[in-house]
Amino acid sequence: MKFTRADFPAKFVFGAATSAYQIEGHSFGRAGSTHWDTFATGPGNVVRAENGAIACDHYHRWEDDLDLLKAAGFDSYRFSTSWARILPDGVGTPNEAGLDFYDRLVDGCLERGLRPALTLYHWELPSALADQGGWVNADIPNWFAEFAQVVAKRLGDRVWSIGTINEPWCVSILSHLMGHHAPGLRDLRAAARATHHVLKSHGRAVAALRAMGQDNLGISCNFEPAQPATDTPENIAAAARANAIYSDLFVTPLFHGHYPKLAMEGLGPHLPDGWENDFDEIRTPIDWLGVQYYTRAIVADAPDVPWPSVAPVEGPLPKTQMDWEIYPDGLYDLLTWLAREHSGALPLYVTENGMANDDEVLNRAVNDHVRADYIDAHLAAARRAIADGAPLAGYFAWSLLDNYEWAFGYEKRFGLVHVDFETLQRTPKASYHALAAALTAET
Ligand code: IFM
């Protein structure tokens, strides 16, 4: 790595991130069924129909995993709480074993000097709520606020921050319009409703947490800024629609109290009754915005496909195992754009950034210098953004461990630490050692 801590502001937070269903092992500890458990049983939904039943067995190996974070010199651990582990029926009686697990995890972070950065929802919706329509059901803001309160009552005295929802775009559009994630719908009406209910749930939970005295509250949005494949008016307009339905879709309501105009062309007719009156709740003040950036999109006009009528075009840059272009300048553009157009002086945290690579263990080592370079280049872009005024306060690498990459099963490896999914053996990769050297170096 070319950076040292001295290159960043004094209080800059370095962390690594994971999520519950992707690492814990959902068959352990009396967790309730989630919509991912059942989505994975659908033909063609997930590579090899894999699920999170065992995952990385973090449920039992969490102490070793926290030791890895501490040894690397991270300041913070971003993890999520599984709704279905804590409330197996989605509402009602909590699973004490689930709360106890997170209790141990939070104490374990603090014992190791790691700030616990908790995300409430990272996609494992309890099946009992999915049965009632899940994010499409107008009651979900109340269900989610109840879940947030249960979590805060038990852990709120010790966590450093609470994020409400991870990647609202994935929860709504990827899952209800594009069909790639649970519940696998391809339905514009469902997507519009899910979008609105995700935003309302976020606002309602923030207000409920604030009323309990919690602070340092935020939300982590993902962005994939779209560029036109060529500069024809049609492709430029297609890129504008792509941005309206993705990168702009949540920050515009969160910071300006309305939907992007171009997104309304498609979503508008399907929004739930009374949606216009919900923006005060959606804009409930937050303390930080989480920014999740992996790549850009290049798009062309596609009049023959349904709204938003855009088609992806392959870009020229080197790609990761996900086939995502490596484009660090995009992070600079994104952070400066957010501060300029949306969030102003509000602290920004990169709550996810990283790459998948086809890593192998050879002689007990993993040579993933390509990942170290990826992280280094994105941290350089982050530094430039800070120098140009973006109020970036921290960076979390995705991910600590190779894990369950949703519809890709265990095939795509994002970890700083390799996991052998047969033996569950952890092997820190070259990127882990490079980050550790940078973070623990005397400055
Ligand atoms: O693994 C996911 C994570 O769950 C959410 N953000 C993107 C990551 C890589 O696809």
Image (cartoon, rainbow, N blue to C red):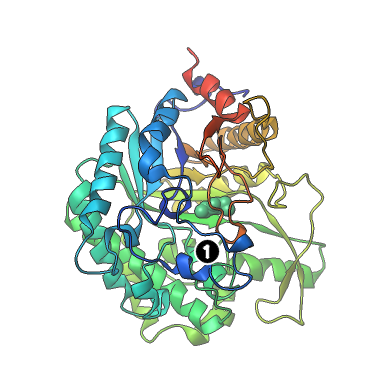
Near mark 1 (Cα within 10 A), the count class, few <14, some 14-19 or many ≥20, is many
| Label 1, ligand 1: CB separation under 8 Å | yes
Residue indicated by mark 1: 170
* 167 or 341, nearer to the observer: 167
In this rendering, is residue 249 above or below 108?
below
Toward the viewer: 41 or 257?
A: 41
Q: Position of residue 377 (x, y in %)?
A: 65, 34
**Is residue 338 in view from this perspective?**
yes
Side of 46 relative to 167 (left or right)? right
Residue 365: x and y in percent read 63, 26
Name the residue at 32% across, 69% down.
280
Q: Nearer the viewer, residue 8 or 60?
A: 60
Image quarter (top left, top right, bottom left or bottom right) of the N terminus: top right
The furthest residue to the top: 442
Picture coordinates of residue 90, whole percent (x, y): 29, 68
Relative to 159, does residue 146 appear above or below in the rendering? Answer: below
Q: How many numbered discs sit on the rendered protein?
A: 1
| In the displayed structure image, the side of residue 100 where residue 346 appears, left or right | right
Report the residue at 70% width, 51% height from top: 324
Lateral position of residue 243 relative to residue 441, left or right: right
SS of the residue at dot 1?
helix
Image point 46% across, 65% down: which residue?
Answer: 37
Name the residue type under label 1: Cys
Residue visible at 49% across and 85% down?
270
Q: Residue 312: image x %, image y %?
A: 74, 65
Residue farthest front in this picture: 423
Would residue 283 be visible to someone looking at this image? no
